[in-house]
Image (spheres, helix red, strand yellow):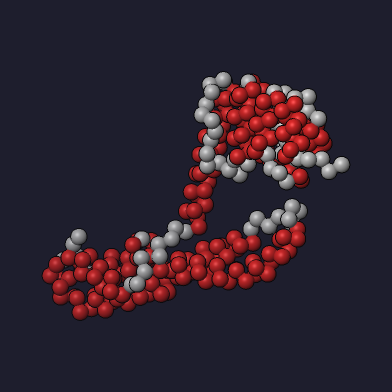
Amino acid sequence: MSRTRAALALSLVLASAGCAWSNRDNRPVWNAFEEHLVPKDDAAFLVSLPLTVPGGVLAILADTFVVHPAQVADDALGDARDVWKHIKWRERYYTELVAIPLRTVATPLVFSGSFIGRSFFDIPPRGARVDQEQQERAENHRKVKEWLDALAADANPERGVSGTRGMDWSAELQKSFAAAHARANSQQRLTLYRAAHLNAWKPATDDPALGLLDPDPVVRYEVLEWVSRERNTVPEEVLDRLRDDPNEMVRLRARERFPSEH
């Protein structure tokens, strides 16, 4: 590090309490001051110290308490808006209704916390987070499609795929899922059902009875072991069929886990 940077960095450490300064993008005033007003020549640098040190401190203060906070205000506002995302009136009307006062109270708290945190710490902007989330979604899509295609090709892939719970489901994935299901043997279908349920893929969320009516009784029994006990998860007509299943083990397990109310 040059003497210029070393001397002025010392002023920085003394003046700034946060670590947002570690990111060059968070200090535009200082960058301009350093580029245009700090002499590159050693002799001129020493002579100008009585002027550059106070100027550098002012640049630091301006970045720390004015410019950088102004940069992060939009991100803090976006964080506060996230409190109101994912409201599901159709599925959880009364729960969401009760949550409105809580969301109302939380909104200014989230904004204040985010604004202060982003002002004094090097927190990636929301745009960077969105880009990262998009990359993760693309990677999850690729990983799941490769796994489904391997299953369809009878390649016996690993037991499941992790880290894809609730991922966005596409028509392309649905096509691969259908192909894998059509070509899979009983053991592979069980692997497919388990992955769909554990990861909350759309085939399982759209059809909570997925696997319960499989032609293989062993598969039906295994799926019964992990399916939710909540009655509204599986249609009653499916439970009736399982309670009268031609296979005794399936029939007994279904009656044990989902006793009839009639």
Q: Residue at x 61, y 30 (%)?
A: 192
Vertical placement of residue 64 versus 89, above or below: below
The answer to whether 69 appears left or right of 9 in the picture is right
Q: As drawn, is 252 to the left or to the right of 67?
A: right
Q: Is residue 182 left or right of residue 69?
A: right
Residue shown at the point (52%, 71%) measured from the top left: 112
Image quarter for residue 4? bottom left
Q: Position of residue 23 (x, y in %)?
A: 36, 60
Q: Identify which residue is drawn at 55% across, 62% down.
A: 79
- Determine if residue 210 is in view: no
Number of labels in the image equals 0
The extreme left residue here reads: 43
The residue sitting at the right extreme is 262
**89 relative to 185, above or below:** below
The C terminus sits in image quarter: top right
Camera sees residue 120 = yes
Indicate the position of residue 126 as horizontal and vertical percent values: 50, 57
Quarter in which the N terminus is drawn? bottom left
Q: Residue at x 24, y 76 (%)?
A: 53
Picture quadrant where residue 33 is located: bottom left
Residue 176 percent coordinates (x, y): 62, 28
Q: Position of residue 211 (x, y in %)?
A: 69, 31
